[in-house]
Image (cartoon, rainbow, N blue to C red):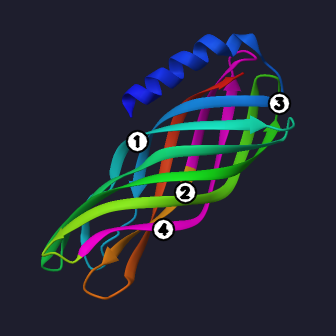
Amino acid sequence: MKKIAAVLLFSTAVAAPAFAADNGLYAGVTLGRSKTNNPYPGTTMTKSTDTVLGVLGGYQFTRNLGAEVFYTGAGKFAATGGGGSGSGKADVWGIDAVGTLPLSEAFSLYGKLGYARAKTSASSVPAGLTGATRSAVTYGLGGVFNINQSIGIRLGWDRYAAATANGNVAGAKDNFNSNVYSLGAVFKF
């Protein structure tokens, strides 16, 4: 993952100065902090925050409307209580519509609304809770400071839905949410 992010960052930094406009392709990398709600009912969280990495690619159709695909970690978590303990991590892939509100040439706000699929890997002692996938609506807010026409710094918050499977009840899932606060760089082509 770190190698992919480094290659993406380097390749976009080299190519970015060639093109700049209010519309067109862009790519980015993010580094953030996740805060996970408790995925294990009846337990107490012992770890609910984690450092996460992400990558994104998008197309700005107009000055105010774009779309992007993304991958991000949604965090690691751990809980104990109720006669056992559990831990896991979630990763998210998705697509968002992105609305942008330029406030000046250098700064704009954005809102995202989309669809994401979270894959959670989890385990518990005693056994019973395992990983699961959950597809749901995702959304986020943030701002972008444009260093120049090719490079922007993005600060944002995103909300993702995930789940663990309860092996003690056939087909049962325990749903939870993860909030990711991130700082990233966006490179326009």
Q: What is the x, y in percent for residue 150?
A: 71, 18
- Please tell me which residue is depicted at 59% across the width and 15% down the height of the picture: 13
Q: What is the x, y in percent for residue 73?
A: 42, 47
Residue indicated by mark 3? 23
Quadrant location of the N terminus in the rendered image: top left
Whichever of labels 2 and 4 marks the residue nearer the N terminus, that label is 4
Secondary element under disc 1, as helix, strand or loop, is strand
Question: Label 1 vs label 3: CA separation?
Answer: 28 Å
Quadrant hosting residue 102: top right
Asked if residue 30 can be seen in this view, the reply is yes
Q: What mark, if any, has residue 134 been given in the picture?
A: 4
- Please tell me which residue is depicted at 30% across the width and 73% down the height of the picture: 40
Question: Which SS does the magenta portion mostly show?
Answer: strand
Q: What mark, if any, has residue 86 been given in the picture?
A: none
Amino acid found under the numbered disc labelled 2? Arg
Whichever of labels 2 and 3 marks the residue nearer the N terminus, that label is 3
User: In the displayed structure, does residue 17 sit left or right of residue 178?
Assistant: right
